[in-house]
Amino acid sequence: MHSEALSRVLYAITNDKGCALLSGEYGCGKTALVRKVIEALDPEVYELALVNYPIFSADEFLREVLFQYGVDTSSSGSKLEMFHRFSTFGYENVKKNKQNVLIIDEAQLIEDAEIYEQMRLILNVQLEEKGLFSILLVGQPEVRERILAYPQLDQQISIRYHLHYFSHDDVVAYIRHRLRIGGMTREIFNQEAYVAITRASHGVPRRINSICDLCLLDAAASRVQIIDDVIVQKVQ
């Protein structure tokens, strides 16, 4: 699921598809996936701005984005002047054969309708029919409902993907994968433990990490070789 999401998001960015929307439940790995997206983008080709916590007014939006692009925003200016600076910045990068990418994490926090309108205008800025900016919106499920209220922006979203909670099989595969990455070559959780972890975590990767971490700590302290459901219940 995460591999598919990564593939679709990168397709949208690298093929000038305008805007992509990645949504998902709390703790399902959205921020980790954003890091993978950033790692995959060659800084020689892509000029990247990342806004992690978009709680600001419409007057501050372009200023914050320019700041994240590394542009000096100390001088004051109207929204129109800031938009001109923003457009000029985008044009200059495209002339250098660099693509501008804007990633907004926790996008469900945006409540000001004018910010959505500014994003629409950003997506409309073009040079020889090529968009100057690609936008990736990342947020919890309610971000989808918010954007639906702004059809002009919603129509510009070319790629949408929603990350769901893990099924039981996903939980087992995820834990085994993490153990392999850590160098573990044998099975250390029994089947009852996997069932207990699925129930306790509700399939949320962040909770799975926490539960398994505590299970490993308890097993090490108790010098047991196999983690069972009793240990899982004990550490909750």
Image (cartoon, rainbow, N blue to C red):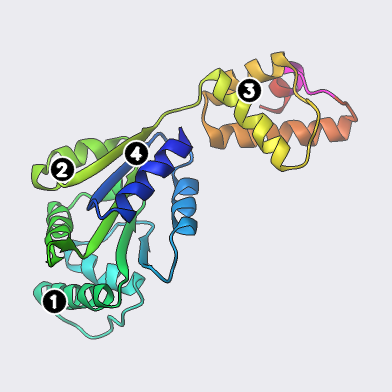
Mark 1: few, some, or many residues within 10 Å (few <14, many ≥20)? few
Q: Quadrant of the N terminus?
A: top left
CA separation, marks 2 and 1? 24 Å
Of residues 222 and 24, the one drawn nearer to the viewer in this rendering: 24
Of discs 3 and 1, which sits in the foreground?
1
SS at circle 1: helix
Q: Residue at x 30, y 66 (%)?
A: 99
Assess whether mark 1 and mark 3 are in contact (beta carbons under 8 angstroms).
no
Mark 1–mark 4 CB contact (< 8 Å): no
What type is the residue that disc 3 sits on?
Ile
Kindly state the secondary structure of the residue where label 4 is placed.
strand
Which of disc 4 and disc 1 is earlier in sequence? 4
Callout 2–callout 4 Cβ contact below 8 Å: no
How far apart are the alpha carbons under marks 1 and 4? 31 Å
- Residue 154 is marked as 2
Q: Amino acid at mark 1?
A: His
Residue receiving disc 1: 84
Give the CA separation, mark 3 to mark 4. Answer: 24 Å
Outermost residue toward the top? 192
- Residue in the picture at 79% in, 26% down: 188
Magenta stretch in the rendered image: 226-231
Measure how far apart labels 3 and 1 are at the Cα level: 53 Å
Q: Helix or strand or loop: what does disc 3 sit on? A: helix
Residue beneath label 4, please?
Answer: 23
Which amino acid does the dot numbered 4 rest on?
Answer: Ser
**In this rendering, would 125 be left or right of 32?**
left
Residues packed near mark 2 inside 10 Å, few (<14), some (14 to 19) or many (20 plus): some
Tell me, for residue 197, which label it has, or none. Answer: 3
Could one spot residue 84 in this view of the protein? yes
The answer to whether 198 appears left or right of 158 in the picture is right
